[in-house]
Image (cartoon, rainbow, N blue to C red):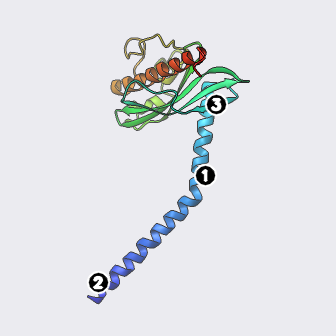
Amino acid sequence: MKETLKLGLVLAAFAVGACVALALVYAVTGPTIEGHEVKQLELSLKELFPDADSFRALDGDVAPKDPSVKFDQTYEVTRSGSPLGVAVKVRGSSYGGDTTMLVGVGTDRRITGVKVLDIKDTPGLGANAKSPTYFVDKSTKTTFPGQFAGKPLSDPFEVKKDVVAITASTITSKALANMVKQAGASAAEYLERSALGGK
């Protein structure tokens, strides 16, 4: 009985020590990781809007119509106070789980660009959506997200019509195209309200 109790106390001490060590590691590395994520987001926003000098976070002003899609954050994009468009950090379910993308929409009601931030789909298939070396059009070296740049919001955003699918990844392609469509439609509504003086 005493041996069992002693063994239990030793195991408990190791468990407490491991928890304390993990907490210390997180306390030290947590801010660094968060800072890195913020920096990566800033760089991604600049990719979509190279001329921008300001990305102002919007609180609840832009919301998706499709309940399967969530907007983690939206930004009003400006240069010297003049509006350039809206950027939407959008999340939705794909083949392998949640996918997060950044979608830029210009004041001309066209997609300025799309960047896949995180995707859990099958490597070599759906995960090709994030690959800079996988091309849906090899002749022009156009990536899956690259095909949306300059696309008017009036387009249907339908796979096998105006959106080229990733090979053998129709579910992923449809899910991501829908996320871009939802982000674009909601951003366009915000831009219209802003132009009408609603903001």
Q: CA distance from mark 3 to mark 2?
A: 60 Å
Q: Quadrant of residue 158?
A: top left
Give how far across and how far down residue 11 sits, in percent: 37, 76
Give how far across and how far down residue 12 sits, in percent: 38, 76
Residue at 44% x, 22% y: name it: 182
First of labels 1, 2 by sequence position: 2
The residue that disc 3 covers is 55
Report the quarter where the N terminus lies.
Answer: bottom left
Could you say which disc has been placed on residue 4 in the image?
A: 2
Is the C-beta separation of discs 3 and 1 under 8 Å?
no
Residue at 57% x, 24% y: name it: 86
Between circles 3 and 2, the one closer to the viewer is: 3
Residue at 51% x, 63% y: name it: 23
Above or below, 151 relative to 11: above
Q: Secondary structure at mark 2?
A: helix
In the image, farthest residue toward the left: 1
Give how far across and how far down residue 168 sits, in percent: 34, 25
Above or below, 163 relative to 60: above
Left or right? Give the position of 162 relative to 113.
left
Q: Secondary structure at mark 3?
A: strand
Crowding around mark 2 (Cα neighbors within 10 Å: few <14, some 14 to 19, many 20+) is: few
The residue that disc 1 covers is 32
Q: CA distance from mark 1 to mark 2?
A: 42 Å
First of labels 3, 2 by sequence position: 2
Give how far across and how far down residue 170 sits, in percent: 34, 23
